[in-house]
Amino acid sequence: MLHERITADPKVMMGKPCIKGTRVTVEFILRMLGSDHSVEELISEHDVTREDILAAQFFAAQYLAHDRIMVGE
């Protein structure tokens, strides 16, 4: 299961969900991908794997599936 790659520890990055064993947050990965950085850039520059990136995306999608999102008018 991809969630095994995601952890949240109040002592690491203020408890934000991170890739296990790193200080790379799910938020950071999503922001980088949304800012037109490639998966390959993330892998080479931030010591994460393709599977970590997929886990971050899956985690975010699961979170959003259970939350109400307010979008600007």
Image (cartoon, grey):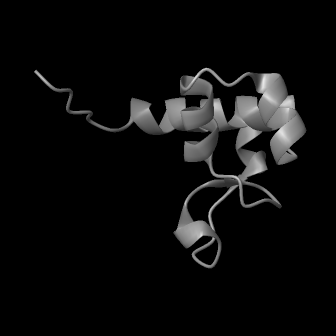
Q: Is residue 47 left or right of residue 68?
A: right
Q: Position of residue 51 (x, y in %)?
A: 83, 32
* Near-viewer residue (40 or 9): 40
Hey, which residue is sitting farthest left in the picture? Answer: 73
Q: Is residue 16 left or right of residue 9?
A: left
* Near-viewer residue (57 or 2): 57
Which residue corresponds to the image point at 83% horizontal and 61% vertical from the top-left? 21
Which residue corresponds to the image point at 67% horizontal and 55% vertical from the top-left? 18
Which residue corresponds to the image point at 52% horizontal and 29% vertical from the top-left? 61
Q: Is residue 13 left or right of residue 67?
A: right
* Near-viewer residue (69 or 46): 46
Q: Is 27 situated above or below 17?
A: above
Q: Position of residue 57 (x, y in %)?
A: 62, 30
Q: Is 19 situated above or below 56?
A: below
Which residue corresponds to the image point at 63% horizontal and 51% vertical from the top-left? 25
Q: Position of residue 29 (x, y in %)?
A: 64, 38
The number of discs equals: 0
The N terminus - image quarter? top right
Place residue 66 in its image quadrant.
top left
The answer to whether residue 67 of the structure is visible from this angle is: yes
Q: Is 68 situated above or below 72?
A: below
Q: Is residue 10 left or right of residue 52?
A: left
The answer to whether residue 1 of the structure is visible from this angle is: no
The C terminus - image quarter? top left
Q: Position of residue 39 (x, y in %)?
A: 77, 24
